[in-house]
């Protein structure tokens, strides 16, 4: 007598499940991609430690010491944005690649060398706005002007870093001119950046899901900026 054939459907289902849960399966690739987003986001957050320490220990005050220290604490911001855009481009192109964290810090060192002028200019503009608020902060018009100036400066910083990330470098005049022309041609792209930043900060401030979301927010914003730039043909 011959044994009855064993049904192949459970075996096939087990094989598919094993393929999904394998070390090179879909679940492992998804977890690796999520981890890379986490690494890039935490790396960006580490660059903001001086600003966080300043806000916790001193905070904004209408004094010379507070204004100068607050401006100096933002010096790492420009190379951090440049590194975020470089590493998030790698995340977007190679989702399971394990080198996004190394790419961030290599790009941060490169940005600290090549974009030092932009970092100093940003701190100088923040210092100027801080003195304006300290002297004329009681005026509603001054508050509106400071908010609009901060949005323009932030958009210009992202544009300069985006152009530098694409070109791989350039003189300050070339990068600033290219970034200004790109924003002038497509101002809706810069508005989309600011909208994403506002929505991201609002979601990170939510009581329950805000803190876990903030651990992935910088990398998600970097990827979102690249998607907007590619879809709307920025630069």
Image (spheres, rainbow, N blue to C red):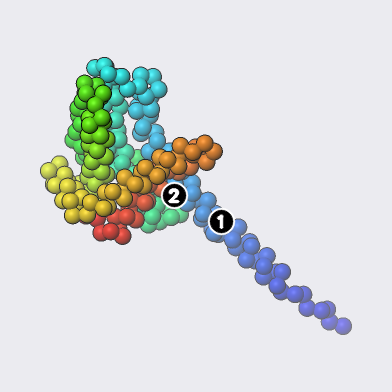
Which residue is denoted by mark 2 in the rendering?
Answer: 98
Is the residue 33 above or below the residue 204 in the image? below
SS for tag 1?
helix
Quarter assignment of residue 133: top left
- The residue carrying pointer 1 sits among few (fewer than 14), some (14 to 19) or many (20 or more) residues within 10 Å by Cα, namely some
In the image, which is nearer the foreground, mark 2 or mark 1?
1
Residue at x 82% of width, y 79% of height = 4
SS for tag 2?
loop
- 114 or 129: nearer the eye? 129
Is residue 146 rendered to the left or right of residue 225? left
Which residue is denoted by mark 1 in the rendering?
Answer: 27
Q: Position of residue 218 (x, y in %)?
A: 39, 43
Query: Image quadrant for the C terminus?
Result: bottom left
Is the residue 100 above or below the residue 19 in the image? above
Q: Position of residue 25 (x, y in %)?
A: 55, 59
Is residue 62 rendered to the left or right of residue 29? left
Q: Position of residue 40 (x, y in %)?
A: 41, 43
**Which comes sooner in the sequence, label 2 or label 1?**
1
């Amino acid at each position: 007598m011959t044994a009855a054939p064993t049904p192949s459907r459970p075996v096939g289902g087990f094989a598919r499940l094993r393929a999904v849960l394998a070390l090179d399966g879909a679940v492992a690739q998804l977890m690796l991609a999520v981890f890379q987003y986490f690494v890039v986001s935490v790396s960006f957050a580490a660059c903001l430690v001086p600003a966080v320490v300043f806000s916790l220990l001193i905070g904004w005050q209408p004094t010379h010491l507070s204004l100068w220290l607050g401006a100096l604490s933002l010096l790492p911001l420009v190379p951090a944005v440049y590194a975020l855009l470089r590493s998030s481009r790698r995340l977007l192109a190679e989702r399971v690649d394990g080198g996004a964290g190394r790419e961030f810090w290599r790009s941060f060192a490169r940005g600290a060398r090549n974009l030092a002028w932009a970092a100093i200019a940003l701190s100088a503009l923040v210092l100027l706005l801080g003195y304006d608020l300290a002297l004329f902060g009681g005026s509603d018009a001054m508050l509106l002007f400071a908010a609009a100036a901060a949005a323009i400066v932030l958009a210009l910083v992202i544009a300069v870093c985006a152009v530098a990330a694409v070109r791989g470098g350039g003189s300050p005049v070339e990068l600033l001119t290219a970034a200004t022309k790109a924003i002038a041609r497509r101002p809706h792209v810069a508005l989309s950046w600011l909208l994403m930043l506002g929505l991201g900060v609002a979601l990170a401030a939510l009581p329950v899901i805000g803190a876990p979301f903030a651990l992935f927010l910088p990398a998600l914003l970097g990827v979102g900026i690249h998607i907007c730039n590619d879809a709307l043909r920025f630069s």
